[in-house]
Every structure is written in C-alpha cells, then in structure tokens.
Image (cartoon, rainbow, N blue to C red):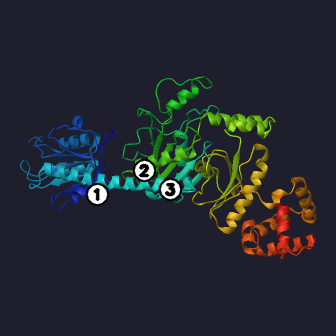
Amino acid sequence: MPDPAVPPTPPVLLDALLARADLGLRRIAGPADPAVVVHWAHTSEMADPYPYLLGGELLLSAGVHVPDGAGAGYFDAYVSRIVAAGGAALGFGVAPVHDTVPGALVEACEMHGLPLVEVPPRTTFSAVARALWQLMAQARTAELRRVTEAQQSLAAAAARPDPVPSVLQQLARRLSGRAVLYGPEGTRLVGAGPEPGEEVRTALAKLAEVVRPPSPGHLRTPSPGHPRTPSPEDPRPPSAGHTRASSPGHTRASSPGHRVGSGPVAPAGSPGDLHADLAARPSSASDTVAGVRLVAHALGNGEGFVLGTAAPQRDAGDHTIASVAAVLLSLLTGERHSGSGAGRSSALVRLLLGAAPAQVAPLLGGDRWRVVHGRPEGRAAPDPVTASALGAALGSSLVDVAGEVVRVLVPDGRAVERVPGWTLGVSAAAAPRDWPAADTQAARALARARATRAPLLRHGDRPTALTDLVPPAEADAHARALLAPIEQSPALVDTLRTWLSLHGSWDRTAVALDVHRNTVRQRIARCAALLDADLDDPDVRMELWFALRRT
C-alpha cells in the first residue's frame, strides 16, 4: 500500500466524525477500530478511484458509477482498489441514486476491512467535508497549544542546574513514555520516564545506531537487519520490522539492511568514506516494537549523541516536541569549537609534555584566573554533562568533575554570580603559579558556604590587615612553630581551621566537613590537648587563626 501524502493538518479519528449528531453518519461495515483516522474527504463517482486518491481519505460516493445489475465482483474490485490506494474509509450516500446501501458493497467492505459509513439523505457531502475540516481545525489548535506548552516547559528545564536530566524528564512526561540520551559510544547516559521491557530497550539502542554519525576512527558499514528508513513525518505506524528515517531530501531505502542515501559508497578507508557515510546517515529514524513507538534523533552537535524516545502511542505534535528537545540537548551537550578551543588543546598538550602552568596560561586567554568549586544542592554526584552546564553558566569550558564537586577555572575579568541550584565557593584571582592555592581557597569557601547555607561565598581580596604588617618569613616561621604539634594530621588542621572560621559552631563545622558533630568535638579536644591551649580563649583563637592563614 503506498504511503499517503500527509496534509499539514492533523488527522481526525473516524469515530469523532461519526459522533457528530448533526451529520447522522452510521458505520455499517468494516472494522470498528477506534484508531482509524481520516486525513481529508474526497468525492468521486469514478468506477476506479485509485488514480485520484493520495491515501488517508474518506471517499464519498452516491453510487452513480454503479451499473445496473452490478454484482459482488464489481463491488469487490471497487473496494479493493480503494484499499490499494490507501483510502481510510468509504462514505456511501443514500438517495437519490440508491435507496439503501447495496448489500454486495457491505460484504466487500467487510471482507477487505474497509470501514463503510452510511450518509443519510439529509446530509450533504459538503457538510461532511466541512465537519471534517472543523474537527481538523480543533485538533490543530489543541496540537499547537500542546506544543507551545511543551516548548515552554522544555526551555525552563534547560535552564535548571541539571539541564539534561530535567529536559529528558519533561520530554518523557510530555510523550507519556521513555526518553534516553545515548553517548557517542552508544552508552546510555541519562534516562527518564517508565523503563520499558528488554525487547524495547534493545530495539531503541539499535535504532540509535542507525542515526549516530560516525567518527573518522569508527566508520560503520551497514549490516543485515538494519531497519528501513522512510520519512518520519508519515503519521501511520509502520508494519512490524519497518523503520522510518529522515534525512536531507527525505531519501528512502528500498529494503531492510540498506543504508539511507544514493550513489556509490566509497570503499572503507578511502578519503571520501567518512563524507559518504555522513551524507547517508538519516537525522532521525522510527520503528514500532511490541506496540511501542520508537524514535531516534541524532543531535546536531556532531559529537555522536543520540536522543531516543519510546512511547505507547503517537499523538499529534510528538515529532515537534521531540525535535525541540533534540535542539536543546544539542546545545547542552555540544562542545564549542573555536580558536579558544584550539588554544585549550595546545595548552593541554604542552602540560603533558612538561611545560609549566605559567607557560601555557596565555593560551587559555588570560593571566589571572579564579577557581570555582560548585556542588549541586540536594543531589547526587554530578555527571559530566551537568558539570558542563555549570561551566556554561559561569562562562567557561574549563571544567573538572572531582567526586561530588565540580571545579571550574574562570578568567578574572568574568564576573562569577550565583547559579540557581548550586552552592559555590570562589577563590581570589591568581596567577598560574598560585592556582593550587586558589584551588584550596575555593574548596574552603565552598565548605563555609555549605555550612552557612549561602549560595555563594568568595575568598575575596580585603584591605590591609594587622597580620600583613608582620614580615612574611617571620609570620611563616611562627605559624609552623605554633602548629607543629598537629601538622602531621591534616584532619586535625582542617577541622581546627573550619571550626574557627565558623566561630566554634559544632553543627556547621560538621556540615562543612561531612562528619558527625561528635567527631568535630573529639578532633577539637585533641587539638587543644596537643597544642596545650585553651581554645575558649579569644586571644588563643586569634593567634591560631593567624597561623592557619599562613598555611
């Protein structure tokens, strides 16, 4: 059966048209399938309507073409041609030619599985067509409203601290199904929505391979069993094992296992192999497995990420909603290719080859930088995609995931502001040789921010203090001597530092260090014993704080 040329309006359920009391339509033969849809209405009195049908029509006829004495053979041929053309249903008008619907026509429609609708004498074919277009307009309005609401919710999700999981969650909710982001190597990175069965999961992963663009080192050749790839805009689900795919120009494959595209394919390893493979890859593909509609979208960043969706049914607007999500995910997962990106690559190579940080810093775009430590609020350890989103919010792609903390290197000239959903600690601006110290400053600022429940704390510059009047060498020597009894225990030093910075608060120190408050008490008591000092004395605290600031 040929695929229908789908109009730019959503299809209408045949049952919705039959429910119009003003028309008085009645189904008298054919399957009572509630999923039957109509794309348009067409009137024809041709004995063979096949050449004039595009598919998906409600064909309306008063039986003028029926010759006198027509028998079962005539009606069987007539109905079979409508079915072959892809007609959705046949509407037969009673009067003025026929007083009743011919019985042979009823039998033929029943045999070929074509819904047959009786149109009463009081209902004109124009009224049926007008009612159909009214239902289409209503469906179109509902579709546009649904798409608009989905676009707004997806855009809001993309602005959250965890944009990729949030976008997938919204997409899964809007499609009432499952949404999965696959990485360049086919690994399932993030998923949202109800988990389907193993058969559907496997089929969706295979469908993602159909659209994934290859890298030069991972060229793939088609293998038997790859699904076919016609256009995804076809609203009717394909038959079992039939996959639809979209590519520039909407090229179609002719058989299973045949890659989308035309013309000869360059031999593997030849210079044109990658370009030929890229040109042949569709941008999206769809399939139906175990009654579940599967769709895969290749993200437009060229990095090999693929968005996959699995929904129990396809509603109007689903393709548009998924396309919006694919665009957002392309932006969220894409790597910015620019001159600064080349500079970062050069800096990494030089560091690996033994260059000092001060020598490669100019390649990164500045001489002084700030280190930012971030931790998502109330969430598990951040994934690389979420970390990249924080870097994008701070205006830097120099991002590192270190356990539960994301570290970002930000140029000094770029303002660091609070990011919703994140707790941030910011170091003072530092030259490359001082970056390790700046990293420590950012870590301490983050710990204090979490303890005080502040969204952002800075280790900012301050005016000259009394401690700055002491010569640095003497200050360092005094600090080492004072802290010598505990210097071999980093846990004691960090606990004392945090406890003093939080004005002796047991609870906030425990939060900052991720330990129990009793552990804090035990460590502080141990510090007091080793230092032989009264830590309740403000003068002692001041002197210890002075020493800790020098370490």
Q: CA distance from mark 1 to mark 2?
A: 31 Å
Occupied quadrant, residue 246: top left
Instruction: From the image, state whether disc 1 or disc 3 is nearer to you.
Output: 3
Which residue type does callout 1 highlight? Ala
Position of residue 138 measured from the top left corner of the image (x, y, whole percent): 27, 55
Q: Is residue 104 left or right of residue 248?
A: left
Q: Which mark is residue 321?
A: 2
Instruction: From the image, state whether disc 3 or disc 2 is nearer to you.
Output: 3
Instruction: From the image, state whether disc 1 or disc 2 is nearer to you.
Output: 2
Q: Is residue 338 visible?
A: yes
> Within 10 angstroms of label 1, few (less than 14), some, or many (20 or more) residues?
some
Q: Is residue 511 left or right of residue 134?
A: right
Regarding mark 1 in the picture, which secondary structure is present there?
loop
> Which residue was labeled with disc 3?
157
Residue at x-position 71% and y-position 34%: 346
- Counting residues from the start of the chain, the first of labels 3 and 2 encountered is 3
> Which residue was labeled with disc 1?
32
Regarding mark 2 in the picture, which secondary structure is present there?
helix
Above or below residue 533? Residue 123 is above
Which residue type does callout 3 highlight? Ala
